[in-house]
Image (cartoon, grey):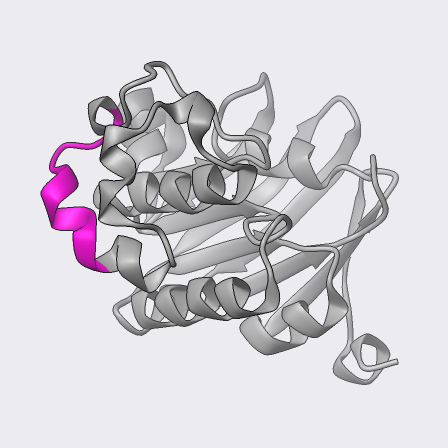
Amino acid sequence: MLSIKNLIRPGLEPVSLELAAGECIALRGPSGAGKSLLLRAVADLDPNEGELTLDGTPREKIPAPEWRRRVGYIPAEPGWWSERLSDHFQDWAAQAGPARRLKVSPEAETRRVSQLSTGERQRLALLRALEHRPEVLLLDEPTGPLDEETTAAVEALLREKQENGLAILWVTHDKRQAERVATRRFWIDRGRLREEMLEEAGQ
């Protein structure tokens, strides 16, 4: 379980929530409301304060690289440090099956990262994160550039990972997607987080 208590940083009011193993929480809000700021703070990529624990262990007791492996973060525009796609994976051959499920040809390995579409890079960033077997995944609009069929494929793959215990905090602008993927839904505006009630979320 990921426990967050009084997490604060510039642009974000104190945030407290708990994310259980196998649970997905959806986070929506207007542009610039603090969604990405919250994910980056949880991932410990920006200066922040608060009490975060993972399976009962305080964040400060976990080395930063280990925290970021166990609490994986995929930004809306993933970064790539090499033009060779295979350089970003421990075992690209093992990704052939998942890549096909996400409508990415295994031959993508032979292409330069700059030759990939925005949607391909987004899906490959997801595979890259999943290869490290995170316990928590922080997703910032992971299906934003994707069509309906490919979005469904991504949601199906992540649903299977949830069944195996993966916890997800999923930022989306799509209310219908939030209703499909999450059991709890939150709204953030001007850095202030509040949980949406079921009847409110359905409006």
The structure residue drawn at horizontal position 23% and vertical position 42%, both measured from the top left corner, is: 107
Q: List x then y, in percent, for residue 28.
A: 74, 55
Residue 17 seen in the current view: yes
Q: Is residue 133 something one can see in this rendering?
A: no
For residue 46: magenta? no
| 176 on left or right of 75 | right
Give the camera-side residue of 38 and 90.
90
Give the main secondary structure, helix, strand or loop, of the magenta stretch. Answer: helix
Q: Position of residue 48 (x, y in %)?
A: 60, 22
Point out the image quarter for the N terminus.
bottom left
Task: Give the residue drawn at x 47%, y 67%.
Answer: 155
Q: Nearer the viewer, residue 25 or 117?
A: 117
Quadrant for residue 186, please give it. Answer: bottom right
Q: Quadrant of residue 183?
A: bottom right
- At a point 52% along the width and 47% down the height, the residue shown is 139
Q: Residue at x 40, y 38 (%)?
A: 125
Image quarter hosting the C terminus: bottom right
User: On the picture, is 166 further left or further right than 18?
Assistant: left
Q: Nearer the viewer, residue 52 or 75?
A: 75
Residue 34, relative to residue 79: is it above or below?
A: below
Q: Which residues fall within the magenta stretch?
A: 88-97
Front residue of 142 and 119: 119
